[in-house]
Image (spheres, rainbow, N blue to C red):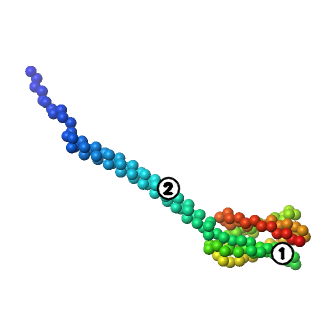
Amino acid sequence: MKTRIFRSRRGFSETVSSVIMTAVVITIGLATWQFANGSTALIAQQYTDGVISQTDDFLERYCINNIRYDEANNMLYLYIYNYGSITITVDSYISLSSGPSYSSIGVTIPPNHLVDVGYHVYIPQDTWINITCQTRRSMTINDRYFQS
């Protein structure tokens, strides 16, 4: 007759299985929390960067203060005033109703300064001039001038 070696057929004790199950649940929970926390931090950082970059758009304020044409020298002057709190770079464009267009690119205006932008152009009598000024952040001002 063969002798059998009887092994214990019992599993882990309830205490050991509870400890293992708790460790698995805590590990899965920490991994999930770490993933969610990292994703949330990334989204929050991207949102913050977007808001900060738009802040300069709100601080950018300027206007065309005056438009003057000097017939003796054939010069059109735009007086652009920056009443904002940041330095701006303005591109200005004029187009005459009779056809030709002119531009002045990259005029830098410090805060609280008035700058004149001159165009050497002949403007005939009874001519409308369309004026567009645009900053590098795309804030646009349109104006019209009539040479009578």
**Alpha carbons under labels 2 and 1: distance apart:** 52 Å
Residue located 49% across and 58% down the image: 44
Residue 100 visible from this viewpoint = yes
2 and 1 marks in contact (CB < 8 Å): no
Helix, strand or loop under label 2: helix
Residue 40 percent coordinates (x, y): 46, 55
Q: In this view, does 72 lie to the left or right of 135?
A: right
Figure check: 19 above or below 74: above
Residue 125 percent coordinates (x, y): 90, 70
* Quarter holding residue 144: bottom right
Residue 31 percent coordinates (x, y): 37, 49
Figure check: 2 above or below 56: above
Q: Which of 123 and 21 is in front in this view?
A: 21
Residue located 42% across and 51% down the image: 35
Q: Nearer the viewer, residue 70 or 22?
A: 22
Which quadrant is home to the C terminus?
bottom right
Identify the amino acid type marked 1: Tyr
Figure check: 48 above or below 19: below
Which dot marks residue 47?
Answer: none
> How many labels sit on residues?
2
Residue 13 percent coordinates (x, y): 20, 40
Identify the amino acid type marked 2: Ile
Q: Is residue 21 left or right of residue 85?
A: left
Residue labelled with disc 2: 43
Q: Which of 14 and 138 is in front in this view?
A: 14
Which dot marks residue 69?
Answer: 1
Residue 110 visible from this viewpoint = no
Which quadrant is home to the N terminus?
top left
Helix, strand or loop under label 1: strand
Upstream in sequence: badge 2 or badge 1: 2
Residue located 70% across and 75% down the image: 81
